[in-house]
Image (spheres, rainbow, N blue to C red):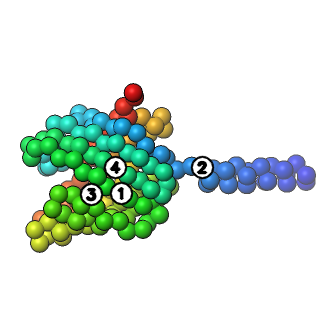
Amino acid sequence: MQRRWFLTAFALLVGVAGAMQAKPNFSGDWKLNVDKSDFGPMPAPTSMTSKIDHADPDLKVTTSMSGQQGDMTFDAKYNTEGKETTNQFGPMEVKSTANWEGDELVMNMKFDANGTEITIKGKWSLSADGKTLTQASHFNSPQGEVDVKYVLEKQTK
């Protein structure tokens, strides 16, 4: 009887410890792996880097991208507890919420592009070794839906 109680208590503690595991930390300097990414019908950037500072619930991202549309740099701030944030991407004001679903960070964004409302549902996930960040996004607009996937690799200094 005492052994059964011990095993039950041990199983409960293991379950609680598993549920309390820390969420992934996305901090670091990241570089897009164009070959592993999928841009759907959208033009692929020739290069992209992201500098991420993540101290939950604060997430700050600076992304620099080069491609057919020239060079662009964007700064964004998010709150991983679901509080709405507003970021400026060029002429567009983007409203976002971010929250954890397990060990994935889910981001919901919406913005108006020349009178057309576009929504994006993104999921960020980190590989077990912490060296690969996958950002999968589903774009929805009156013109249709598009899925893209950016695969970024952590840069070491």
> Quick check: 126 above or below 93?
above
User: Would you name the residue on which mark 3 appears?
Assistant: 138
User: Would you name the residue on which mark 1 appears?
Assistant: 77
Q: Which is nearer the eye, 41 or 3?
A: 41
Which residue is at a point 41% across and 53% down the rendered structure image?
59
Q: Quadrant of the C terminus?
A: top left
Foreground label between 4 and 3: 4
- Given the image, on which type of amino acid does mark 3 rest? His
Q: Which is nearer the eye, 145 or 20?
A: 20
* Element class at badge 3: strand
Residue 151, percent across and down? Answer: 31, 40
Proximity of marks 4 and 3: CB atoms separated by less than 8 Å: no
User: Would you name the residue on which mark 2 appears?
Assistant: 21
Q: Quadrant of residue 92?
A: bottom left
Q: Total label count?
A: 4
* Element class at badge 2: loop
Q: CA distance from mark 1 to mark 4?
A: 6 Å
Q: CA distance from mark 3 to mark 1?
A: 20 Å
Residue 66, percent across and down? Answer: 16, 40
Sequence-wise, the earlier of marks 2 and 3 is 2
Which residue is at a point 20% across and 43% down the rendered structure image?
65
User: Would you name the residue on which mark 4 appears?
Assistant: 61
> Quick check: 49 above or below 141?
above
Sequence-wise, the earlier of marks 3 and 1 is 1
Q: Quadrant of residue 143?
A: bottom left
* Element class at badge 1: strand
Which residue is at a point 44% across and 59% down the rendered structure image?
80
Proximity of marks 1 and 4: CB atoms separated by less than 8 Å: yes
